[in-house]
Amino acid sequence: MFLTYHVSLYIMQILLSNAILNTYFINHPRKEVGRKLCQVIKERGEKLLSAFEFLNKSEITPLDLKRMHDFCKSQDRNLSVAGVALKNRVILSVAFYKSLSTSAEATQIANPSGYIPGVNSFLDNFIKHYLSNAEFRDSLVVHLMRGYVAKVEGVKNPKYGSKVLNFFMALAASGDKKAFEFVSGNVASVSLRWMKTLTSRKRSVPFISLDKKQMVLRVKDIMAKVRAAFGDQTKRLTITVGVDATCLVKAFQVCSSQGVIVGGASPKHFIPIRDNATKEELKDLLQECVDGKHGGLAAEVKCAVLSFQEAPPNMCPYFCLAGLPQSINESNDFGTDVVEACEEAAKEVGNLVVLNTSTDGVSCEVQWNLSVLVDYLQGKINYISLPDPNHNVKNLRGQMIGGSSPAPIGNYIFDPHLLRAAGVAKELYRIDDYTLDALPMKLASAVTIQKLVNMDFEDVGNCAVMMVSLVLM
């Protein structure tokens, strides 16, 4: 408002000066000089009027931009303080419109006429949607803009809404530090360090430290979240309990939030750190762990995952319940404890059914799977055990192809060289990754059998043994 008043006053002064000079030079001997001077003053006045109108236009044409680009070249010495302020505003507006006209957003914000809306028009539309559209008002972009405006106003630590914090938490969780800093820097938002602080505050108890009672509470909490998402607190839910181990990096690490050292195998997977321990004491404790004074390192962590047969929209049907660091294929009661915790939680919350358990079926779980099946057949429990058949296929593949001695059937043997001669892909019988299930499935497929048949080997007995073994694998 202050600038508008002074620009208007400045233009009136120019017009008045033009009228005075015009009257003065009518009777002056050098009339040509007077006319030229009046013409210059008139042209400058028109330029100033055009600049003032440019800032208040509802839409901007390419011709307007060209005229204002020429106006920006005006010398400051020919302008008053108000004129320089007007010129600076025009320079910023021209730069803004040029950036829009060369970007992909130009076609999205253009008016029906095809021209870019003026600043005032754009802000009017923004305010209209902000006041009338609740969904627009609660959008992530608007929340980000609120924080940005607060920073511009000088508020160093504005309070961000949950949408902004959740957005940056998800971005920080991606692990891409450069992407986080790029986004946060451009909208003048939260720092990565503050996100790490918030994440540590929201972090729950480590899932490798849960006992059976804590598992029950966690299952009940998961059930409550799922039913709340369905909008029905009595909805019948069915779950499957999957237990499997995954490898991890063998190393001892400090868990600051819990004040312990993790990385060891159960039951010494939580080694407490003394309160107010110095750096040297912590260093000595870590060295003791490395020396094996507090047990060996864990080679894998066995995880229990709940799989829902029906999940609410936009919610993952899988929930990680608990875990246990252990040595390779260690035999323990972790799976039994998990299933018993789920059964107890089902009794407490009601209308919840455990359908079955799923395991790899390796040696450490054979007895558990057997006891579950026997109890089910005797009517003691209502769920069954479903071992993973692919695991046994991988074991059989390793024994038949990579064994130290050939696998015989009568007078014939399983000859792996026939696979190479038949042109079977090398990665199917030369094992690099023992964890993949897809490769043994392809090895025992009809395509492999057909390749062996097409070779028409003279050694019919060994070829027959191989094909029968692959079919039954």
Image (cartoon, rainbow, N blue to C red):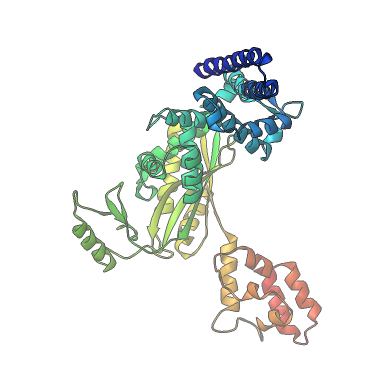
Residue occupying image coordinates x 45% and y 42%:
342
- Is residue 62 or residue 452 the one in the foreground? 62
Nearer to us in this view, 61 or 408: 61
Residue shown at the point (40%, 49%) measured from the top left: 337
Residue drawn at the location 39% of the way across and 47% of the way down = 207
Q: Position of residue 8 (x, y in %)?
A: 57, 15
For this view, does 323 lie left or right of residue 446?
Answer: left
- The x and y percentages for residue 51 are 63, 24
- Residue 405 position, x and y percent, is 56, 84
Q: Is residue 9 left or right of residue 270?
A: right
Q: Is residue 449 above or below residue 459?
A: above
Left or right of residue 97, residue 280 in this image: left
Q: Is residue 188 above or below residue 358?
A: above
Percent of width and height locating residue 444: 68, 69
Q: Is residue 437 visible?
A: yes
Judge whether residue 350 can be spotted in this image.
no
